[in-house]
């Protein structure tokens, strides 16, 4: 969905989002009050500058607008692949963004992620996957890697991967796989401003994605294995 | 002197921690394997490539995890990730002196890519939640596969990183960049270029790694002991200071093309000599010059 249409549907009472290249930010009006918006368009590769820019906004929100919820609308093809980004420590810039979001969480800000177009691998890790809850539009595309590339690297025949992807959510692209595995809480349709209000009303809770993955039978081991390690006799 | 680089994950734990103090949770005898690898006719491991447990370090209680690069490059799958998350959550209950992560990982395991990616994000959240409760998380990075992909982000979420020159730290590995962008962007067979771009010395000079040690497990142990009293700080002031440092890095080095240019800009007189220096000599030469 075009981001301008999306913003209109999410914030029928208005917003002041401003665009700067592939980055955008602003504030939206909701019946629950103002919501801070941080996002990207055009399947932006997330490099050092974009991660830094997003962190900058998060810090400003924490400093100037205590408690204001943060909505991440990040459209990304993944991390930017370049020697320069590695030289400058791109993983540290992404970690910094994650720490800033944790600061916001610890300071009482709700963090909501909505994948409205594309979310891939490291770009997904550095954004929507850090939200309290990540939601998605039904047409969103979510993946680590497409199957032909996966087949080349793992040396597993493409036909075998395609066949298995019919029954297993564990490796193939698809937002439904991420829903089933618990990473995406739910898909938003109908009145998006109502979905947003519901998300703002949802209780603040710890990371419940393993429970959801288990309940939906997409990730059957993550919860139980982590619990066994947590409580193992020693 | 025992090489950290050459050792297996179990050998590292054995030599790093206090003698006979390590107790493993979900040891290989429990046979907690990845069902997804089996489904793809790929050999599984009884520890899924990561060893987690408790021990003492210099007499202090620690929880510790070690990734085994020899199994699928230490890549994170569903079980592997869940073991790390469980250990980090256990630390919230037990409040040990620290959690040690002996990282060695190419990132997400493609055979179970979605589970691995979600698992890494759960590790990230668990590290941040644990640090928020005051328990430091220390990273040791000196293995053959380095620390890349999502684990590269995890490492930089922690309180401190100890590296050897042989350790590597980044997001996208050189091979991945070369395959996607071409050899002119990053020649992954140019070992000198790889080491000076993602290796321990550059990470230390940039201020990302907190200690640069020799490739010796005893040196890693000593550095880890020295970091046990680190106090996690995720306050606005601390993150604003980090923000300023990262902004300054973009300003000062953003237009430079090579680590040698950055080292030169930091005031190192003969940057081309740095890769040749042993850890002690290197530390002496770069003292006071780190970003």
Image (cartoon, coloured by chain):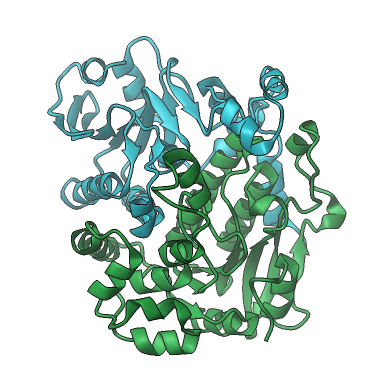
**Residue drawn 62% across the image and 64% down it:** B144
In the image shown, does B219 or B21 lie closer to the viewer?
A: B219
Of residues A100 and A155, the one drawn nearer to the viewer in this rendering: A155
Residue A98 coordinates in the image, percent (x, y): 38, 50
In this orientation, which residue lies closer to the viewer: B49 or A100? Answer: B49
Q: Residue at x 36, y 67 (%)?
A: B233
Question: In the figure, what tint was chain B given?
Answer: green
Q: Is residue A34 above or below residue B175?
A: above
- Vertical placement of residue B285 versus B260, above or below: below
Do we see residue A131 in this rendering?
no
Quadrant showing the C terminus of chain B: bottom left
Q: Is residue A78 visible?
A: yes
From what the image shows, is residue B37 above or below residue B52? above
The N terminus of chain B - image quarter: bottom right
Quadrant in the rendering for residue A35: top left
- Chain coloured cyan: A
- Give the residue displayed 48% in from the left and 23% down from the top: A186
Residue found at the far top of this picture = A190
Image position, residue A132 (x, y; %): 42, 39
- Residue A211 lies, in percent from the top left, at 61, 35
Q: Is residue B39 left or right of residue B208?
A: right
């Amino acid at each position: 969905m075009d981001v301008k249409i999306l913003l209109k549907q999410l914030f029928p009472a208005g917003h002041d989002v401003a665009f700067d290249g592939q980055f955008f930010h602003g504030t939206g009006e909701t019946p629950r009050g103002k919501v801070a918006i941080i996002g990207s368009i055009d399947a932006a590769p997330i490099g050092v500058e974009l991660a830094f820019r997003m962190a900058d906004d998060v810090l400003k929100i924490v400093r100037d607008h205590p408690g204001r919820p943060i909505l991440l609308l990040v459209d990304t093809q993944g991390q930017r692949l370049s020697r320069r980004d590695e030289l400058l420590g791109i993983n540290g810039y992404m970690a910094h963004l994650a720490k800033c979001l944790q600061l916001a969480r610890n300071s009482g800000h709700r963090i909501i992620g909505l994948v409205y177009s594309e979310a891939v691998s490291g770009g997904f890790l550095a954004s929507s996957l850090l939200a309290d809850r990540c939601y998605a539009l039904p047409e969103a595309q979510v993946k680590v890697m497409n199957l032909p590339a996966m087949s080349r690297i793992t040396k597993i025949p493409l036909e075998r991967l395609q066949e298995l992807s019919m029954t297993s959510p564990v490796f193939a692209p698809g937002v439904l796989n991420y829903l089933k595995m618990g990473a995406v809480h739910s898909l938003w349709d109908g009145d998006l401003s109502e979905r947003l209000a519901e998300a703002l009303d949802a209780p603040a809770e710890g990371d419940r994605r393993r429970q959801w993955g288990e309940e939906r039978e997409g990730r059957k081991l993550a919860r139980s294995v982590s619990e066994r390690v947590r409580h193992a006799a020693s | 002197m025992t090489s950290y680089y050459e050792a297996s994950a179990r050998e590292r734990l054995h030599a790093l921690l206090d003698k006979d103090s390590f107790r493993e949770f979900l040891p290989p005898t429990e046979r907690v394997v990845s069902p997804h690898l089996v489904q793809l006719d790929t050999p599984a491991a009884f520890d899924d490539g990561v060893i987690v447990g408790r021990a003492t370090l210099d007499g202090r209680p620690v929880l510790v995890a070690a990734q085994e690069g020899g199994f699928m490059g230490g890549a994170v799958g569903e079980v592997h990730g869940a073991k790390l998350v469980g250990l980090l959550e256990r630390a919230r209950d037990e409040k040990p002196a620290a959690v040690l992560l002996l990282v060695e990982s190419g990132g997400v395991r493609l055979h179970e890519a979605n589970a691995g990616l979600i698992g890494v994000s759960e590790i990230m959240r668990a590290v941040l939640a644990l640090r928020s409760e005051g328990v430091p998380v220390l990273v040791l990075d000196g293995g053959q596969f380095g620390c890349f992909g999502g684990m590269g982000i995890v490492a930089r979420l922690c309180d401190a990183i100890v590296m050897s020159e042989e350790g590597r730290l980044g997001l996208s590995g050189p091979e991945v960049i070369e395959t996607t962008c071409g050899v002119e962007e990053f020649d992954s067979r140019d070992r000198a270029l790889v080491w000076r771009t993602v290796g321990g010395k550059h990470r230390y000079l940039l201020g990302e790694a907190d200690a640069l040690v020799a490739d010796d497990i005893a040196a890693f142990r000593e550095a880890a002991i020295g970091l046990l009293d680190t106090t996690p700080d995720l306050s606005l002031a601390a993150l604003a200071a980090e923000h300023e440092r990262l902004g300054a890095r973009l300003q000062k080095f953003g237009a430079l093309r090579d680590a040698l240019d950055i080292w030169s800009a930091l005031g190192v007189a003969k940057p081309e000599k740095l890769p040749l220096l042993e850890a002690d000599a290197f530390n002496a030469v770069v003292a006071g010059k780190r970003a």
